[in-house]
Amino acid sequence: MKGHDGHDRHGHSHGGHDHEEHEINWIFFGVILAATIVIAYILDLLFNGIPLGFTVPIIDEEGVVSDLIYHAIVTPIGVYIGYLGFKRLIKERTFTTETLMSIASLSALYLDYIFEAATILLLFSFAEYFEHYIEDRARKTVEKLVKYIPEKARVIKGNKEELIDIKKVLPGMEILIKPGERIPLDGVVLEGGSYVDESIVTGESMPVFKKTGDEVYGSTLNVNGILKVRVTKLPEETLVSKIVKLVLEARSKKARMENLVDRFSRYYVPAIIIAAIITAVVPPLFMGEPIRTWIYRALIVLVIACPSAFIISVPATFFSAITLSARKGIIIKGGVYIEKMAEIKTAIFDKTGTLTLGSPSILTDCRNSYFRDKKVLAYAAALERYSNHPIAKAIVRMAEKEDINFKDMKVANVREIPGKGIIGVVNGRTVMVGGIEMLEDRERLDIRELVSDDTHTKVFVIMEKSLAARLCLADKVREDAVEAIKRLKKMGIYTVILTGDKEDVAREIAKELGVDEYYAELLPEEKLELVSRFQSEKGPVAMIGDGINDAPALAASDVGIAMSDVGADVALESADMVLVKNKLTQVPYIYKLSRKTVEIARQNIAISLGTKLLLGALGVMGFIPLWFTVAVGDDGITLFLLLNILRLARVK
């Protein structure tokens, strides 16, 4: 639903109405002109009896009727296209493609090259239509997101449910989402469980199960269960709204090639008009050549030099890459970052939360694990339920995974000792869970025996003053991290890990992943220094981090890429690119896509200018007609370049 101001109901302006009207005009013009050419041609055949073997007894042997049809259709369309060009000339102070095409078609009509005049406008109309079709493919990615934002939310007020406009829903309110409904706003699940289709945000086709405590995003689809959600964001602050805003704003952050095209086009069109005038005037005045011949050749110069293919293809290439990435759950904030990404030589990764999941897990295959009895885990989990520490959550997760019943156990006198552990009474037995520091203070145990030489974090469970379990914990490497590093190295990218973690932990992760270098126990300022060093020694750097602790390094790198699972808002703000799906294999994909985007943009520039120079020279020498110039040199090449852009979709 759009209001009179062209904005949708959520305040996003994307010019849908104007674009749609423009598109309908071009296809309408194309059909009318095609019909005109066909009808006029048939009349010529009938009246002159050329291949049909008979004539129609109408006094049109000179083609008067067909000429009238041409003039009746071509003149108003040519004038209207000229009017569009004049409007843009006044508004933007620049000559446009419409101006050149209008001058060329009306001049050809005046010189009685009426078929050429109609052909110019026919091919131009269809080229404009296909140009907008290509743009629409990109624009509809954004419109699709907007379309799926619900208008109302089912707010829980006491024991009642009330459907209200989402603009009136505030953070802290509780909403209910039934099966088959879209979640209206970002929030946290309070009750219930359901699979949620997050494909419009992440591009992931498989639904994700959401339970109490999980975060959900507005506009995603609740598949099969009932969810009670506490709202955390205003409508304009939801992840989908921010993605829409960023994709729209990406057009303003142009790549160097796009800016070059903009600067070039300001001077190019006026220069071509002057060149066409010189072509039409100089040979007849100074060389005694026929004026009609050179005006015709001047029209060829005017048409062949039309910069539409050159001007359109480069921005369309970059914006297509941006929207293609958005459909795959990668937010790129502008063409400039695609261009920079195509040039990177080094990929620097943060460890915690980027290469690893950022939360410790208990290792069942650790050689230094020890359990007096598996039931000990029930006592530990019952106690750790009262702690928010990441290690406590890991122990609870393992107990749940092992189907150990601990939630009904009676827990009393719980006391957490900061930096050391937790102590309490579980089912009448004193239980302590903590690190070696806690044992040094409280127990007469052989510390040397307990401290092993492995690189994992160790947690001890003490029951009634005796060792009941020794657990090894480690931050697990993301499943796709090895594959991502492998692909980057195969592409010739140097890979590095920077982390504030311990040397032995970093060494183990680096060995597992096969990175070229690693640096451990770093302070934030030391990470910045290393980013600068790699930039000076190896060239442009991409920094991949979690968007929070790595914000300074992300900002200092040539391209900052953030994972969004630790805080989508922070990631969206701090980085140049955001991996909404949190898949590291998207990093080599972005690099490959960026390289292909720049390659296609360069191809389009070279093909456009090269073709125009060649055909322009042939046209001035009189070797090609005006209609061929339009068909091949301008609108034909424009269509070819736009189709070339579609090859981006083949990048995997």
Image: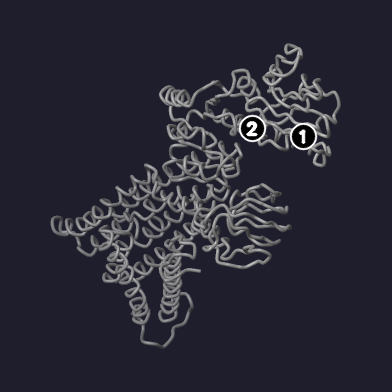
Q: Position of residue 412 (x, y in %)?
A: 76, 36
Q: Earlier in the sequence, mark 2 or mark 1?
A: 1
Mark 1 is on which residue type?
Ala
Question: Against 304, is 595 above or below?
Answer: above
Identity of the residue drawn at 40% across and 24% down: 536
Residue at the disc numbered 1: 381
Pick the front one: 116 or 378: 378
Q: Quadrant of the C terminus?
A: top right
Residue at the disc numbered 2: 483
Does 179 sit left or right of 289 as displayed?
right
Q: Residue furthest left?
A: 286
Question: Against 370, is 216 above or below?
Answer: below
Query: Circle 1 — which element?
Result: helix
Query: Circle 2 — which element?
Result: helix
Does 333 sit left or right of 197 as displayed?
left
Q: Position of residue 138 (x, y in %)?
A: 50, 55
Q: Specify whether residue 443 is in view.
A: yes
Tell me the CA gap for discs 2 and 1. Answer: 34 Å
Q: Specify whether residue 517 is in view.
A: no
Pick the front one: 268 or 592: 592
Q: Position of residue 572 (x, y in %)?
A: 50, 44
Question: Against 485, is 326 above or below?
Answer: below
What is the crowding at mark 2: few (fewer than 14 residues within 10 Å), some, or many (at least 20)? some
Does 616 sit left or right of 427 as displayed?
left
Mark 2 is on which residue type?
Glu
Identity of the residue drawn at 55% across and 44% down: 568
On residue 312, the disc is none
